[in-house]
């Protein structure tokens, strides 16, 4: 498979609301930065590990801010139970 065969399209956070009637839509921050940026920003030592710990804490504490303003939101769709 060549890179030309891969299809990717990024949808906005708001786009996922269309599934609200079919599923419980939850959005979480997965990671704020991609690997390239993390390597540039966080040193590979104890200080860098501490910085990442703070970042992970902030992601968990302020999830809406992080999934709206940083990279890699995680979208979780849980199908609604139809009891008709």
Image: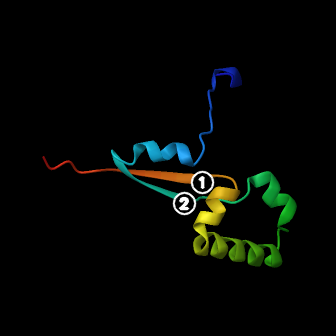
Q: Count of labels shown?
A: 2
Q: Is residue 38 above or below residue 20?
A: below
Residues tagged 1 and 2 counted as in contact (Cβ below 8 A) = yes
Residue at mark 1 to residue at mark 2: CA–CA distance:
6 Å
Say left or right for 61 vs 36.
left
- Which residue is at 64% across, 57% downward? 68
Say left or right for 15 vs 22.
right
| The N terminus lies in quadrant | top right
Say left or right for 3 vs 20.
right
Image location (x, y in percent) of residue 62: 61, 71
Residue situated in front as seen by the camera: 68 or 41 = 68
Residue situated in front as seen by the camera: 56 or 1 = 56
- Which residue is at 65% across, 59% downward? 31
Which residue reaches farthest left? Answer: 84
Q: Which residue is mark 2?
A: 28
The circle on residue 8 is none
**In terms of secondary structure, where does tag 2 sit?**
strand
- Which residue is at 71% across, 77% downward? 54
**In terms of secondary structure, where does tag 1 sit?**
strand
- Which residue is at 62% across, 32% downward? 8
10 Å crowding of disc 2: few (<14), some (14-19), many (20+): some
Mark 1 or mark 2: name the one nearer the start of the chain. Answer: 2
Q: Is residue 76 above or below residue 3?
A: below
Q: Is residue 1 above or below residue 76?
A: above
Image location (x, y in percent) of residue 32: 69, 60
The circle on residue 73 is 1
């Amino acid at each position: 498979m060549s890179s030309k065969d891969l299809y990717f399209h990024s949808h906005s956070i708001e786009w996922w609301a269309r599934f609200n009637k079919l599923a419980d839509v939850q959005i979480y921050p997965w990671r704020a930065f991609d690997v390239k940026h993390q390597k540039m920003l966080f040193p590979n030592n104890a200080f860098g590990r501490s910085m990442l710990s703070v970042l992970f804490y902030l992601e968990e504490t302020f999830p809406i801010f992080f999934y709206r303003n940083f990279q890699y939101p995680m979208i979780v769709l849980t199908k609604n139970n139809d009891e008709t």
